[in-house]
Image (cartoon, helix red, strand yellow):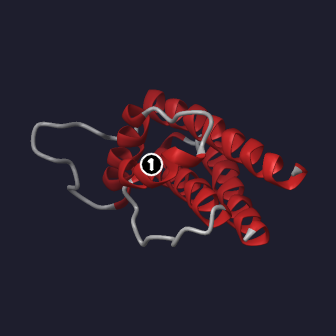
Amino acid sequence: MLNQAKQWLDFAERDRRAAVELATHDDLLGVAAFHCQQAIEKAMKAILELHGKPIPRVHDLVTLNEQVRPFLTTPIDETELGLATDVYLTARYPAADAPGTDASPTRARVDRLIATTARICEAVTAELNRETDQ
């Protein structure tokens, strides 16, 4: 389980790094947002793998957080997860905005997502390191 959890986290880290690089280009902010969401999703799935839980085929981060919450010592802000999911959908699919909302991948939103993604990846890394040290 630990090796597979590390693989999930390695994939998460690649997505996080891709988001940082892509965010340097204003025309690629949507793609950067997509990679932020993917990094968070894979980091959360690393935690589930670490604890022997089934990996759901779910992309909604708030839903995943419900399953991950009992295993993390650092809580994850669900508002940030909701933003990541909303911006991911908007960046990924044409006309994905819900009526009356604007979740477009702006510079400010993507910068916020990159910071959130880094915090979550760091928390998951710390959790995996605790398991390795035991």
Q: Position of residue 68 (x, y in %)?
A: 51, 51
Q: Residue at x 65, y 38 (%)?
A: 118
Q: Position of residue 59 (x, y in %)?
A: 40, 61
Side of 96 where 74 appears, left or right: right
The reply to whether residue 106 is in sight is no
Q: Position of residue 79 (x, y in %)?
A: 37, 32
The image shows residue 45, relative to residue 85, as above or below, that is below
Extreme residue toward the left, this view: 99
Q: Which residue is mark 1?
A: 65
Of residues 32 and 27, the one nearer the viewer is: 32
Q: Residue furthest right?
A: 133
Q: Nearer the viewer, residue 56 or 38?
A: 56
Looking at the image, how many numbered discs can be counted on the residues? Answer: 1
Quadrant for the N terminus, please. bottom right
Q: Nearer the viewer, residue 116 or 130?
A: 130
Q: Residues within 10 Å of mark 1 (few under 14, many from 20)?
A: many
Can residue 116 be seen in the rendering of this structure? yes
Q: Secondary structure at mark 1?
A: helix
The amino acid at mark 1 is: Asn
Q: Residue at x 16, y 47 (%)?
A: 98
Taking the image as shown, residue 109 lies to the left or right of residue 3, namely: left
Q: Residue 43: x, y in percent?
A: 61, 54
